[in-house]
């Protein structure tokens, strides 16, 4: 099965008790990763490449995301991460505008109706991972990250899940590794912690996890 392009967004916020990250629990009835705690995200839709963001990915981020795909696809991945976050948590990531673009996409229409347009320059790439062969779903996922200061909406502690993603909440980074996590999510959380602690997050490596000849391989982007 050929992996499908997907994108995830890791929202973090800093507080007196340390950083927190937004996660939710997947529904137990799902074939793919049931009951696991994950970040909001999902596969890329065609409309993700048709909506113009307010700003594009920063050059150094786009260069990493676009390895293995076009720059247009890289921007669509960033847009997918923001759209999926809205669909699964109700949170809008972007900037308010007076006249948002029009679209025939139902999902993007609901997003843009709030007068907010995604801004991709606020996104950092944390990791890329391709689901191992043999699973019922396979994705080539890019994990993006941004500060919750860019969220427009009610980013309170108890957020309504989408049905696909349940128990959505801000989890202390120090506690996140103790949840029931997919292996790749645990690795990503480690890199999130390194980025938040680093004086210059740009110096933190971006892992690319995939399987070749039955073995896990980690390259750096």
Image (tube, rainbow, N blue to C red):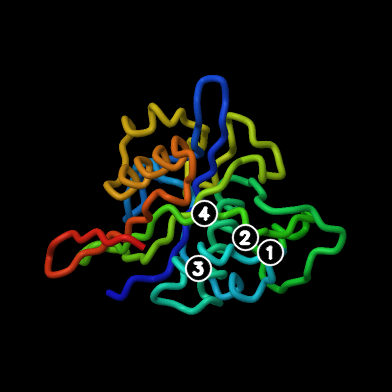
The residue at which mark 2 appears reads as 120
State yes or no: discs 1 and 2 in contact (Cβ < 8 Å). Answer: yes
Label 3 or label 1, whichever comes before in sequence order: 3
Q: Nearer the viewer, mark 3 or mark 4?
A: 4
**At numbered mark 2, what does the secondary structure look like: helix, strand or loop?**
helix
Label 1 or label 2, whichever comes before in sequence order: 1
Mark 2: give few (<14), some (14-19) or many (20+) Cα within 10 Å. Answer: many
Mark 4: give few (<14), some (14-19) or many (20+) Cα within 10 Å. Answer: many
**At numbered mark 1, what does the secondary structure look like: helix, strand or loop?**
loop
- Quick check: 35 above or below 67? above
Nearest to the observer: residue 35 or residue 19: 19
Residue 216 point in image, percent of width and height: 18, 59
Q: Residue at position x 61%, y 53% from top?
A: 122
The residue at which mark 3 appears reads as 44
Between the C-alphas of marks 3 and 1, the distance is 19 Å
**At numbered mark 3, what does the secondary structure look like: helix, strand or loop?**
loop
Residue 173 point in image, percent of width and height: 43, 31
- Quick check: 131 above or below 90? below
Label 2 or label 3, whichever comes before in sequence order: 3
Between the C-alphas of marks 1 and 4, the distance is 14 Å
* Quarter occupied by the N terminus: bottom left
The residue at which mark 1 appears reads as 55
Between the C-alphas of marks 2 and 4, the distance is 9 Å
Q: Nearer the viewer, mark 2 or mark 3?
A: 2
* Quarter occupied by the C terminus: bottom left
Q: Residue furthest top?
A: 16
- Residue 159 located left or right of residue 20: right
Q: Residue at position x 28%, y 59% from top?
A: 209
Between the C-alphas of marks 3 and 4, the distance is 18 Å
Between the C-alphas of marks 2 and 3, the distance is 15 Å
> How many numbered circles are shown?
4
The residue at which mark 4 appears reads as 124
């Amino acid at each position: 099965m050929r992996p499908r392009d997907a994108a995830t967004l890791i929202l973090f916020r800093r507080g007196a008790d340390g950083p927190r990250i937004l996660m939710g629990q997947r529904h137990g009835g799902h074939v793919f990763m049931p009951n696991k705690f994950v970040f909001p995200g999902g596969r890329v839709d065609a409309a993700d490449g048709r909506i113009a963001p307010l700003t594009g990915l920063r050059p150094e981020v786009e260069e990493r995301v676009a390895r293995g795909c076009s720059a247009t696809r890289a921007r669509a991945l960033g847009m997918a991460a923001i759209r999926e976050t809205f669909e699964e948590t109700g949170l809008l990531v972007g900037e308010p505008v007076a006249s948002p673009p029009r679209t025939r996409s139902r999902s993007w229409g609901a997003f843009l109706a709030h007068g907010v347009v995604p801004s991709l320059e606020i996104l950092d790439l944390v990791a890329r991972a391709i689901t191992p062969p043999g699973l019922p779903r396979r994705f080539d996922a890019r994990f993006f990250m941004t500060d919750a200061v860019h969220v427009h909406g009610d980013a309170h502690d108890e957020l309504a899940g989408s049905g696909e993603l349940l128990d959505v909440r801000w989890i202390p980074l120090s506690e996140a590794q103790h949840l029931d996590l997919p292996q790749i999510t645990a690795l990503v959380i480690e890199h999130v912690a390194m980025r938040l602690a680093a004086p210059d997050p740009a110096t933190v490596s971006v892992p690319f996890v995939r399987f070749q000849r039955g073995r896990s391989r980690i390259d750096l982007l």
